[in-house]
Image: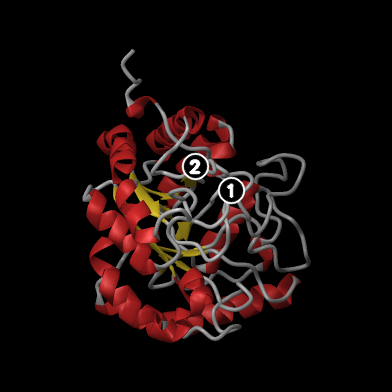
Amino acid sequence: MAAKPLICYFFTCNTMNRRQFAQITGASVFGLGSASLLAKEVKKGTPFKAKFAPHPGLLFGGKGKKLSYLDQLKLAYDLGFRAWEDNGLKGQKNETIEKIAEFMKDKKMDLGVCVITGGAGAMFNKPTDEQKETVKKELERGIEVAKITGQTNMTMIPGARDKSISREEQIKASVDNMKLCCDLVEEHGIIMAQEPLSHNVRGGEPLIRSFADGHLLCKLVDRPSCKLLADFYHEGQIGNGDKLVENAEAVWDQVSYIQYGASPGRKEPGTGKLDYVAVTKFLRKKGFTGVIGMEHGASKKGQEGLDALMAAYRKIDA
């Protein structure tokens, strides 16, 4: 019997299980009123030059009031942000996603990544049929969301490490399955932004750990729908904090998306050892105008935390 085409399968998204930095709270996503409970108290800020993108839960600030999803978007806009990021967006109902997309379009804000698949614990060089089927479903859901939002980049975690072979050998052996994933999403304009991680994933150690690992995978796949997500927090966490700009330069031809976060601590820039002033200058030198995800938490609570976060980003945006 002929084997089923691999395009009929692939991955499990740990979108809702993947570590997230805050949770949406309140009775319902849009249930706290038509006007922002907090944005009224916030002096509208000058738009940032860079497209820094906060995520749900990051901007509570103020008196500690927890806002509905739409009110968080309003607050982000009033503070000067012109982009937004939500790893778990695929888990929302379509009607909610439509409201988010409508707001973003009306305010001319850019939508950054959500996680299209977290890897299902699969080893991409030898995925099981069940893992393939899960990945296929996750990619199809990503396509459905992208049709509503118009976003392009979506985070992909390309599975776990097979320690029976070298990392380079496994990356090479994973290329064919990655190309089948590309076949599914590419016609819809989606870029699967491959994210190297410093922490483990479902299945253990991740396949790609560094910028260099992700670059090798993307170069070998050689498709416009398979690019690199350069999260400077993870690159710093694996011991490359003093080489962020150097390492980013080396892989720049494959980078489609950027994320920030202090290392150690994973809070706003300036609270760790990474030089985000230098990184931001590098991005401007390269002509990068895409979304920069603020994939981290706040170092302090309430209004103090919001003020510290805003000051950190105003500093690096100068």
Q: Could you say where residue 267 lies in the image, as x and y percent from the top left? A: 61, 73
Mark 1 Cα within 10 Å, few/some/many (few <14, many 20+)? some
* Mark 1 and mark 2: Cα distance apart in space: 8 Å
Q: Is residue 78 above or below residue 49?
A: above
Asked whether 92 or 62 is in front, the reply is: 92
The residue to which callout 2 is attached is: 122
Earlier along the polypeptide chain: callout 1 or callout 2?
A: 2
Q: Tell me which residue sits at (55%, 69%) in the image.
A: 44
Q: Is residue 122 above or below residue 279?
A: above
Q: Tell me which residue sits at (30%, 62%) in the image.
A: 215
Q: Is residue 210 visible?
A: yes
The N terminus - image quarter: top left
Q: Could you say where residue 297 lies in the image, as x and y percent from the top left? A: 64, 67
Q: Tell me which residue sits at (24%, 53%) in the image.
A: 220
Q: Is residue 256 visible?
A: no
Name the amino acid type tagged 1: Arg
Name the amino acid type tagged 2: Ala
Asked whether 162 or 302 is in front, the reply is: 162
Element assignment for label 2 = loop
Number of marks drawn: 2
The residue to which callout 1 is attached is: 202
Position of 309 compared to 240: left or right?
Answer: right
Q: Could you say where residue 128 lies in the image, as x and y percent from the top left? A: 47, 32
Q: Is residue 3 above or below residue 19?
A: above
